[in-house]
Image (cartoon, helix red, strand yellow):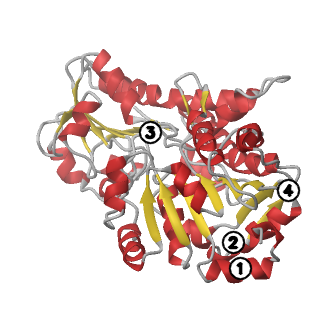
Amino acid sequence: MSMLNLSKKEFKNKFKNGEITVAVYGQGKMGLPLANVFSEAGVNVIGVDICEEVVQNLNKGINHITEEPFLSELVAKNVKNGTYTATTDGKLAAEKADIMIILVPTLTDEKGNIKLEPVYNVAEIIASGLKEGNIVITEATMPPSTTESLIPILEKNGLKLNDGDFGLAHAPERTMTGTALRDIKGQYPKIIGANDSKTLEILSGMYETINSAGIVPISSIKGAEAVKVFEGVYRDVNIGLANELALWCEEHDVEALEVFESANTQPYCHIHTPGAGVGGHCIPVYPWFVINSSKEFNPRITKTARELNDYMAHHMVELTIKGLNSFEKSLKNAKILVLGLTFRGGVKEFMKSAAIPIISELNSWDADVYTFDPLCNEEDAERFGAKWTELEAHMWDAVIITSDHVEFKNMNLGDLKNNMSVPLIVDGRNIIDPVVAREKGFKYLSAGNFKL
Protein backbone atom coordinates (compact mmCIF):
# COMPACT_ATOMS: atom_id res chain seq x y z
CA MET A 1 0.00 0.00 0.00
CA SER A 2 1.37 3.43 -0.98
CA MET A 3 2.29 5.62 1.96
CA LEU A 4 0.36 8.44 0.28
CA ASN A 5 -2.84 6.40 0.57
CA LEU A 6 -2.59 6.21 4.34
CA SER A 7 -4.63 8.41 6.65
CA LYS A 8 -2.71 10.71 8.94
CA LYS A 9 -3.51 8.45 11.90
CA GLU A 10 -2.39 5.32 10.04
CA PHE A 11 0.83 7.00 8.99
CA LYS A 12 1.64 8.20 12.51
CA ASN A 13 1.12 4.69 13.89
CA LYS A 14 3.49 3.22 11.32
CA PHE A 15 5.93 6.06 11.89
CA LYS A 16 6.04 5.55 15.66
CA ASN A 17 6.28 1.77 15.25
CA GLY A 18 9.40 2.00 13.11
CA GLU A 19 7.68 0.90 9.89
CA ILE A 20 8.75 4.07 8.03
CA THR A 21 12.33 4.67 6.92
CA VAL A 22 13.67 8.20 6.54
CA ALA A 23 16.88 9.04 4.66
CA VAL A 24 18.49 12.38 5.49
CA TYR A 25 20.93 13.55 2.81
CA GLY A 26 23.64 15.65 4.43
CA GLN A 27 25.03 14.77 7.86
CA GLY A 28 26.44 18.16 8.76
CA LYS A 29 25.53 20.74 11.36
CA MET A 30 21.80 20.59 10.63
CA GLY A 31 21.31 17.21 8.92
CA LEU A 32 22.91 15.08 11.62
CA PRO A 33 20.82 16.54 14.48
CA LEU A 34 17.62 16.16 12.44
CA ALA A 35 18.40 12.55 11.55
CA ASN A 36 19.04 11.67 15.16
CA VAL A 37 15.93 13.41 16.50
CA PHE A 38 13.91 11.24 14.11
CA SER A 39 15.94 8.20 15.17
CA GLU A 40 15.34 8.96 18.84
CA ALA A 41 11.60 8.89 18.09
CA GLY A 42 11.96 5.25 16.97
CA VAL A 43 12.11 5.84 13.21
CA ASN A 44 14.56 3.89 11.07
CA VAL A 45 16.93 6.57 9.80
CA ILE A 46 19.65 6.42 7.16
CA GLY A 47 22.10 9.31 7.25
CA VAL A 48 23.71 9.95 3.87
CA ASP A 49 26.97 11.85 3.48
CA ILE A 50 29.69 12.04 0.83
CA CYS A 51 32.54 11.87 3.35
CA GLU A 52 33.64 8.28 3.93
CA GLU A 53 35.44 9.10 7.19
CA VAL A 54 32.36 10.83 8.61
CA VAL A 55 30.18 7.85 7.71
CA GLN A 56 32.60 5.33 9.20
CA ASN A 57 32.76 7.25 12.46
CA LEU A 58 29.00 7.72 12.64
CA ASN A 59 28.47 3.98 12.27
CA LYS A 60 30.75 3.58 15.29
CA GLY A 61 28.63 6.06 17.21
CA ILE A 62 31.22 8.85 16.92
CA ASN A 63 29.81 12.32 16.34
CA HIS A 64 31.86 14.78 14.25
CA ILE A 65 29.72 17.84 15.14
CA THR A 66 31.23 17.95 18.61
CA GLU A 67 30.26 21.55 19.33
CA GLU A 68 26.55 20.67 19.28
CA PRO A 69 25.43 20.03 22.88
CA PHE A 70 24.04 16.52 23.64
CA LEU A 71 24.46 15.34 20.04
CA SER A 72 27.35 12.97 20.77
CA GLU A 73 25.34 11.12 23.39
CA LEU A 74 22.30 10.95 21.08
CA VAL A 75 24.27 9.57 18.12
CA ALA A 76 25.93 6.92 20.29
CA LYS A 77 22.55 5.87 21.74
CA ASN A 78 20.79 5.68 18.37
CA VAL A 79 23.59 3.66 16.76
CA LYS A 80 23.56 1.27 19.70
CA ASN A 81 19.77 0.92 19.44
CA GLY A 82 20.04 0.23 15.72
CA THR A 83 17.69 3.02 14.65
CA TYR A 84 20.42 5.08 12.97
CA THR A 85 22.95 4.05 10.34
CA ALA A 86 25.05 6.11 7.93
CA THR A 87 26.14 5.48 4.35
CA THR A 88 27.76 7.12 1.35
CA ASP A 89 25.47 5.15 -1.00
CA GLY A 90 22.70 7.62 -1.65
CA LYS A 91 20.99 5.45 -4.25
CA LEU A 92 20.73 2.50 -1.87
CA ALA A 93 19.37 4.83 0.84
CA ALA A 94 16.67 6.05 -1.56
CA GLU A 95 15.74 2.50 -2.48
CA LYS A 96 15.30 1.63 1.21
CA ALA A 97 13.62 4.85 2.34
CA ASP A 98 10.02 5.98 2.25
CA ILE A 99 10.85 9.65 2.87
CA MET A 100 13.97 11.43 1.65
CA ILE A 101 15.09 14.75 3.16
CA ILE A 102 17.65 16.99 1.46
CA LEU A 103 19.60 19.07 3.97
CA VAL A 104 22.88 19.98 2.30
CA PRO A 105 24.59 23.40 2.32
CA THR A 106 23.28 26.12 0.00
CA LEU A 107 25.76 28.97 -0.14
CA THR A 108 26.89 31.88 -2.29
CA ASP A 109 30.25 32.87 -3.70
CA GLU A 110 31.94 36.19 -2.88
CA LYS A 111 29.75 37.97 -5.46
CA GLY A 112 26.54 36.58 -4.03
CA ASN A 113 25.98 34.04 -6.80
CA ILE A 114 23.92 31.14 -5.48
CA LYS A 115 25.55 27.71 -5.39
CA LEU A 116 22.91 25.00 -5.57
CA GLU A 117 24.92 22.17 -7.16
CA PRO A 118 24.82 20.04 -3.98
CA VAL A 119 21.00 20.09 -4.01
CA TYR A 120 20.74 19.11 -7.67
CA ASN A 121 23.36 16.38 -7.23
CA VAL A 122 21.38 14.86 -4.36
CA ALA A 123 18.16 15.05 -6.40
CA GLU A 124 19.84 13.05 -9.18
CA ILE A 125 20.87 10.38 -6.67
CA ILE A 126 17.41 10.22 -5.09
CA ALA A 127 15.78 9.93 -8.53
CA SER A 128 17.76 6.75 -9.20
CA GLY A 129 16.09 5.04 -6.24
CA LEU A 130 12.74 6.86 -6.02
CA LYS A 131 9.69 4.60 -5.73
CA GLU A 132 5.95 5.09 -6.02
CA GLY A 133 4.48 6.47 -2.80
CA ASN A 134 7.73 8.11 -1.64
CA ILE A 135 8.00 11.72 -0.48
CA VAL A 136 10.96 14.00 -1.16
CA ILE A 137 11.45 16.97 1.18
CA THR A 138 13.90 19.82 0.91
CA GLU A 139 14.88 21.36 4.25
CA ALA A 140 17.91 23.23 2.94
CA THR A 141 17.30 26.98 2.68
CA MET A 142 17.03 27.91 -0.99
CA PRO A 143 15.69 30.63 -3.29
CA PRO A 144 11.93 30.25 -3.73
CA SER A 145 11.07 27.95 -6.68
CA THR A 146 14.21 25.80 -6.27
CA THR A 147 12.37 22.77 -4.87
CA GLU A 148 9.96 22.69 -7.81
CA SER A 149 12.89 22.99 -10.22
CA LEU A 150 13.89 19.50 -9.02
CA ILE A 151 10.73 17.95 -10.48
CA PRO A 152 12.21 17.11 -13.94
CA ILE A 153 15.15 15.44 -12.22
CA LEU A 154 12.98 13.41 -9.85
CA GLU A 155 10.72 12.30 -12.72
CA LYS A 156 13.59 10.79 -14.74
CA ASN A 157 12.65 7.24 -13.69
CA GLY A 158 9.14 7.60 -15.11
CA LEU A 159 7.21 8.61 -11.98
CA LYS A 160 5.02 11.72 -12.31
CA LEU A 161 4.42 14.18 -9.51
CA ASN A 162 1.12 15.44 -10.94
CA ASP A 163 -0.16 11.87 -11.21
CA GLY A 164 0.36 11.40 -7.48
CA ASP A 165 3.19 8.90 -7.91
CA PHE A 166 5.28 10.64 -5.27
CA GLY A 167 5.09 13.68 -3.01
CA LEU A 168 7.25 16.79 -2.88
CA ALA A 169 7.56 19.38 -0.13
CA HIS A 170 9.68 22.06 1.45
CA ALA A 171 9.96 22.19 5.23
CA PRO A 172 12.74 24.66 6.05
CA GLU A 173 15.10 23.96 8.91
CA ARG A 174 14.80 26.67 11.58
CA THR A 175 17.83 25.82 13.68
CA MET A 176 21.05 27.38 14.93
CA THR A 177 24.38 25.77 15.69
CA GLY A 178 24.57 25.20 19.41
CA THR A 179 20.81 24.78 19.89
CA ALA A 180 19.93 22.46 17.00
CA LEU A 181 18.33 19.66 19.05
CA ARG A 182 16.26 22.12 21.06
CA ASP A 183 15.16 23.95 17.92
CA ILE A 184 14.14 20.80 16.03
CA LYS A 185 12.15 19.43 18.95
CA GLY A 186 9.96 22.46 19.40
CA GLN A 187 11.57 25.84 19.88
CA TYR A 188 9.69 27.00 16.77
CA PRO A 189 6.76 25.52 14.82
CA LYS A 190 7.55 23.58 11.65
CA ILE A 191 6.75 25.25 8.33
CA ILE A 192 5.53 22.90 5.59
CA GLY A 193 4.54 23.55 2.00
CA ALA A 194 3.67 20.55 -0.21
CA ASN A 195 2.59 19.78 -3.76
CA ASP A 196 -0.82 18.47 -2.63
CA SER A 197 -3.02 18.14 0.44
CA LYS A 198 -2.26 14.43 0.93
CA THR A 199 1.48 14.99 1.10
CA LEU A 200 0.94 17.89 3.48
CA GLU A 201 -1.25 15.71 5.71
CA ILE A 202 1.35 12.92 5.89
CA LEU A 203 4.21 15.31 6.63
CA SER A 204 2.18 17.12 9.26
CA GLY A 205 1.82 13.80 11.02
CA MET A 206 5.55 13.13 10.71
CA TYR A 207 6.78 16.46 12.05
CA GLU A 208 4.15 16.56 14.80
CA THR A 209 5.82 13.44 16.15
CA ILE A 210 9.10 15.26 16.86
CA ASN A 211 8.09 18.95 17.14
CA SER A 212 6.10 19.95 20.21
CA ALA A 213 5.48 23.48 18.85
CA GLY A 214 3.27 22.14 16.07
CA ILE A 215 2.93 22.74 12.35
CA VAL A 216 2.32 25.84 10.22
CA PRO A 217 1.05 24.71 6.81
CA ILE A 218 1.81 26.99 3.85
CA SER A 219 -0.32 26.94 0.70
CA SER A 220 2.62 26.42 -1.66
CA ILE A 221 6.11 24.99 -1.75
CA LYS A 222 7.44 28.32 -2.99
CA GLY A 223 5.80 30.12 -0.07
CA ALA A 224 7.44 27.75 2.41
CA GLU A 225 10.83 28.44 0.82
CA ALA A 226 10.20 32.18 1.14
CA VAL A 227 9.49 31.90 4.88
CA LYS A 228 13.03 30.94 5.88
CA VAL A 229 14.66 33.26 3.36
CA PHE A 230 12.59 36.20 4.59
CA GLU A 231 13.46 35.41 8.21
CA GLY A 232 17.14 35.89 7.34
CA VAL A 233 16.50 38.99 5.25
CA TYR A 234 14.51 40.53 8.11
CA ARG A 235 17.42 40.05 10.51
CA ASP A 236 20.00 41.36 8.05
CA VAL A 237 18.00 44.45 7.12
CA ASN A 238 17.25 45.31 10.73
CA ILE A 239 20.86 44.84 11.75
CA GLY A 240 21.78 47.07 8.81
CA LEU A 241 19.38 49.72 10.11
CA ALA A 242 20.93 49.47 13.58
CA ASN A 243 24.41 49.88 12.09
CA GLU A 244 23.32 52.89 10.04
CA LEU A 245 21.77 54.57 13.07
CA ALA A 246 24.90 53.73 15.08
CA LEU A 247 27.09 55.47 12.50
CA TRP A 248 24.81 58.51 12.72
CA CYS A 249 25.19 58.43 16.51
CA GLU A 250 28.98 58.40 16.19
CA GLU A 251 28.85 61.46 13.94
CA HIS A 252 26.55 63.35 16.31
CA ASP A 253 28.20 62.28 19.58
CA VAL A 254 25.19 60.33 20.81
CA GLU A 255 25.55 57.01 22.66
CA ALA A 256 23.71 54.58 20.36
CA LEU A 257 22.87 51.73 22.74
CA GLU A 258 21.39 54.12 25.27
CA VAL A 259 19.14 55.58 22.58
CA PHE A 260 18.24 52.17 21.15
CA GLU A 261 17.34 50.69 24.54
CA SER A 262 15.21 53.71 25.35
CA ALA A 263 13.45 53.61 21.97
CA ASN A 264 12.77 49.89 22.39
CA THR A 265 10.66 50.52 25.49
CA GLN A 266 7.97 51.46 22.96
CA PRO A 267 6.40 48.10 21.92
CA TYR A 268 6.43 48.85 18.19
CA CYS A 269 10.16 49.57 18.13
CA HIS A 270 12.83 46.86 18.13
CA ILE A 271 16.16 48.32 17.02
CA HIS A 272 18.81 45.60 16.91
CA THR A 273 22.35 45.74 18.29
CA PRO A 274 24.99 47.27 15.99
CA GLY A 275 28.41 45.72 15.59
CA ALA A 276 31.33 44.57 13.48
CA GLY A 277 29.20 42.75 10.92
CA VAL A 278 26.98 39.74 10.34
CA GLY A 279 28.43 36.24 10.18
CA GLY A 280 27.42 32.61 9.78
CA HIS A 281 25.88 30.49 7.04
CA CYS A 282 22.43 32.09 7.22
CA ILE A 283 21.83 35.80 7.71
CA PRO A 284 24.59 37.12 5.39
CA VAL A 285 23.74 34.52 2.72
CA TYR A 286 19.95 34.45 2.37
CA PRO A 287 19.57 38.09 1.23
CA TRP A 288 21.41 37.11 -1.94
CA PHE A 289 18.65 34.59 -2.67
CA VAL A 290 16.33 37.59 -2.98
CA ILE A 291 18.79 39.96 -4.65
CA ASN A 292 20.06 37.58 -7.33
CA SER A 293 16.71 35.94 -8.12
CA SER A 294 14.88 39.22 -8.70
CA LYS A 295 14.14 39.91 -12.36
CA GLU A 296 11.79 42.86 -12.68
CA PHE A 297 12.75 45.01 -9.72
CA ASN A 298 15.83 45.93 -7.73
CA PRO A 299 15.54 44.96 -4.02
CA ARG A 300 17.31 48.12 -2.87
CA ILE A 301 16.77 47.89 0.89
CA THR A 302 17.99 44.29 1.07
CA LYS A 303 21.06 45.07 -1.03
CA THR A 304 21.96 48.24 0.86
CA ALA A 305 21.69 46.48 4.22
CA ARG A 306 23.96 43.69 3.00
CA GLU A 307 26.56 46.16 1.78
CA LEU A 308 26.39 48.17 5.01
CA ASN A 309 26.76 45.10 7.22
CA ASP A 310 29.82 43.98 5.25
CA TYR A 311 31.26 47.49 5.62
CA MET A 312 31.19 47.33 9.42
CA ALA A 313 34.32 45.16 9.66
CA HIS A 314 36.22 47.90 7.82
CA HIS A 315 34.69 50.44 10.18
CA MET A 316 36.26 48.63 13.15
CA VAL A 317 39.65 49.24 11.54
CA GLU A 318 38.71 52.89 10.99
CA LEU A 319 37.87 53.22 14.68
CA THR A 320 41.17 51.57 15.60
CA ILE A 321 43.13 54.03 13.45
CA LYS A 322 41.31 57.02 14.95
CA GLY A 323 41.80 55.68 18.45
CA LEU A 324 45.52 55.12 17.96
CA ASN A 325 45.92 58.52 16.35
CA SER A 326 44.42 60.11 19.45
CA PHE A 327 47.44 58.66 21.31
CA GLU A 328 49.73 59.95 18.52
CA LYS A 329 50.37 56.39 17.37
CA SER A 330 49.95 54.90 13.90
CA LEU A 331 48.56 51.54 12.95
CA LYS A 332 51.79 50.57 11.22
CA ASN A 333 53.82 48.26 13.48
CA ALA A 334 51.22 48.61 16.26
CA LYS A 335 50.59 45.45 18.26
CA ILE A 336 46.89 44.72 17.78
CA LEU A 337 45.07 41.95 19.64
CA VAL A 338 41.95 40.66 17.86
CA LEU A 339 39.75 38.89 20.41
CA GLY A 340 37.75 36.24 18.61
CA LEU A 341 38.03 34.32 15.35
CA THR A 342 34.57 32.76 15.28
CA PHE A 343 31.55 34.64 13.98
CA ARG A 344 29.51 34.00 17.15
CA GLY A 345 30.27 33.37 20.78
CA GLY A 346 30.34 29.75 21.90
CA VAL A 347 30.35 28.34 18.35
CA LYS A 348 33.46 27.34 16.43
CA GLU A 349 32.40 28.51 13.00
CA PHE A 350 34.26 31.00 10.79
CA MET A 351 31.81 31.61 7.94
CA LYS A 352 31.64 35.37 7.32
CA SER A 353 33.35 36.08 10.63
CA ALA A 354 34.15 39.77 11.05
CA ALA A 355 37.62 38.83 12.33
CA ILE A 356 38.72 37.60 8.90
CA PRO A 357 38.45 40.89 6.93
CA ILE A 358 39.60 42.85 10.00
CA ILE A 359 42.81 40.81 10.28
CA SER A 360 43.38 41.08 6.54
CA GLU A 361 43.01 44.86 6.55
CA LEU A 362 45.20 45.27 9.63
CA ASN A 363 47.91 43.28 7.86
CA SER A 364 47.59 45.55 4.81
CA TRP A 365 48.45 48.47 7.14
CA ASP A 366 51.55 46.56 8.35
CA ALA A 367 50.17 46.17 11.85
CA ASP A 368 51.52 43.40 14.08
CA VAL A 369 48.36 41.29 14.39
CA TYR A 370 47.69 38.70 17.08
CA THR A 371 44.55 36.83 17.99
CA PHE A 372 43.05 34.78 20.79
CA ASP A 373 39.84 32.76 20.82
CA PRO A 374 38.92 30.27 23.56
CA LEU A 375 37.56 27.84 20.94
CA CYS A 376 40.51 28.05 18.57
CA ASN A 377 44.22 27.31 18.35
CA GLU A 378 47.43 28.44 16.68
CA GLU A 379 46.59 26.68 13.43
CA ASP A 380 43.28 28.59 13.19
CA ALA A 381 45.07 31.89 13.78
CA GLU A 382 47.68 31.24 11.11
CA ARG A 383 44.99 30.19 8.66
CA PHE A 384 43.54 33.71 8.79
CA GLY A 385 46.83 35.58 8.87
CA ALA A 386 47.31 36.34 12.57
CA LYS A 387 49.73 35.18 15.24
CA TRP A 388 48.37 33.13 18.11
CA THR A 389 48.74 34.55 21.60
CA GLU A 390 47.41 34.61 25.13
CA LEU A 391 45.94 37.79 26.59
CA GLU A 392 48.94 38.61 28.77
CA ALA A 393 51.66 37.77 26.24
CA HIS A 394 52.44 41.29 24.98
CA MET A 395 51.93 44.96 25.68
CA TRP A 396 49.06 45.69 23.31
CA ASP A 397 48.48 48.98 21.52
CA ALA A 398 44.81 48.17 20.89
CA VAL A 399 42.30 45.38 21.45
CA ILE A 400 39.53 44.73 18.92
CA ILE A 401 36.68 42.49 20.11
CA THR A 402 35.13 40.56 17.22
CA SER A 403 33.33 37.63 18.95
CA ASP A 404 30.90 37.74 21.87
CA HIS A 405 32.41 34.83 23.81
CA VAL A 406 31.40 34.76 27.46
CA GLU A 407 35.10 34.74 28.35
CA PHE A 408 35.45 38.18 26.77
CA LYS A 409 32.33 39.52 28.45
CA ASN A 410 33.73 38.49 31.83
CA MET A 411 37.39 39.34 31.35
CA ASN A 412 39.15 41.39 34.00
CA LEU A 413 39.63 44.85 32.48
CA GLY A 414 42.20 45.75 35.14
CA ASP A 415 44.41 42.83 34.15
CA LEU A 416 43.93 43.67 30.49
CA LYS A 417 44.99 47.29 31.04
CA ASN A 418 48.19 46.12 32.74
CA ASN A 419 49.13 44.44 29.46
CA MET A 420 48.51 47.47 27.24
CA SER A 421 50.88 50.24 26.25
CA VAL A 422 47.85 52.15 24.93
CA PRO A 423 44.52 51.56 26.75
CA LEU A 424 42.33 51.33 23.63
CA ILE A 425 39.36 48.95 23.23
CA VAL A 426 37.42 48.78 19.99
CA ASP A 427 34.36 46.72 20.87
CA GLY A 428 32.88 45.19 17.71
CA ARG A 429 30.22 43.32 19.67
CA ASN A 430 29.14 45.88 22.29
CA ILE A 431 29.80 43.42 25.11
CA ILE A 432 31.84 45.70 27.38
CA ASP A 433 30.11 48.35 29.46
CA PRO A 434 31.58 51.63 28.15
CA VAL A 435 31.12 53.35 31.50
CA VAL A 436 33.07 50.64 33.30
CA ALA A 437 35.75 50.59 30.61
CA ARG A 438 36.28 54.34 30.84
CA GLU A 439 36.32 54.21 34.64
CA LYS A 440 39.15 51.68 34.31
CA GLY A 441 41.08 54.19 32.20
CA PHE A 442 40.36 52.83 28.72
CA LYS A 443 39.54 54.78 25.63
CA TYR A 444 36.49 52.82 24.49
CA LEU A 445 35.12 52.89 20.94
CA SER A 446 32.37 50.85 19.34
CA ALA A 447 29.74 51.04 16.63
CA GLY A 448 27.63 53.95 17.85
CA ASN A 449 29.95 54.98 20.66
CA PHE A 450 32.78 57.23 19.50
CA LYS A 451 34.28 59.48 22.16
CA LEU A 452 37.93 60.40 21.75
How packed mark 4 is, by other alpha carbons closer than 10 Å (few <14, some 14-19, many 20 or more), is: some
Does residue 446 lie above or below 85 as drawn?
above
Which mark is first along the chain, 2 or 1?
Answer: 1
Is residue 141 visible in this depiction of the protein?
yes
Give the spatial CA distance, label 2 vs label 3. 32 Å
Give the spatial CA distance, label 1 vs label 2. 7 Å
Q: Quadrant of residue 340?
A: top left
Q: Are marks 4 and 3 in contact (CB under 8 Å)?
A: no
How packed mark 3 is, by other alpha carbons closer than 10 Å (few <14, some 14-19, many 20 or more), is: some
Identify the secondary structure beneath mark 3: loop
What is the three-letter code of the residue carrying label 4? Gly
Q: 25 or 276, which lies in front?
A: 25
Give the spatial CA distance, label 1 vs label 3. 38 Å
Which mark is first along the chain, 3 or 2?
Answer: 2
What is the three-letter code of the residue carrying label 2? Met
Q: Quadrant of the N terminus?
A: bottom right
What is the three-letter code of the residue carrying label 3? Met
Q: Is residue 1 left or right of residue 53?
A: right
Q: Quadrant of residue 243?
A: top right
Q: Is residue 399 left or right of residue 185?
A: left
How packed mark 1 is, by other alpha carbons closer than 10 Å (few <14, some 14-19, many 20 or more), is: many
Q: Is residue 441 left or right of residue 237?
A: left
Which mark is first along the chain, 4 or 1?
Answer: 1
Residue wearing tag 4: 164
Q: Which mark is residue 12?
A: 1
Give the spatial CA distance, label 2 vs label 4. 19 Å
Q: Are marks 1 and 2 in contact (CB under 8 Å)?
A: yes
Between circles 2 and 4, the one closer to the viewer is 4
Q: Which mark is residue 351?
A: 3
Give the spatial CA distance, label 4 vs label 3. 40 Å
Residue wearing tag 2: 206
Which mark is first along the chain, 4 or 2?
Answer: 4
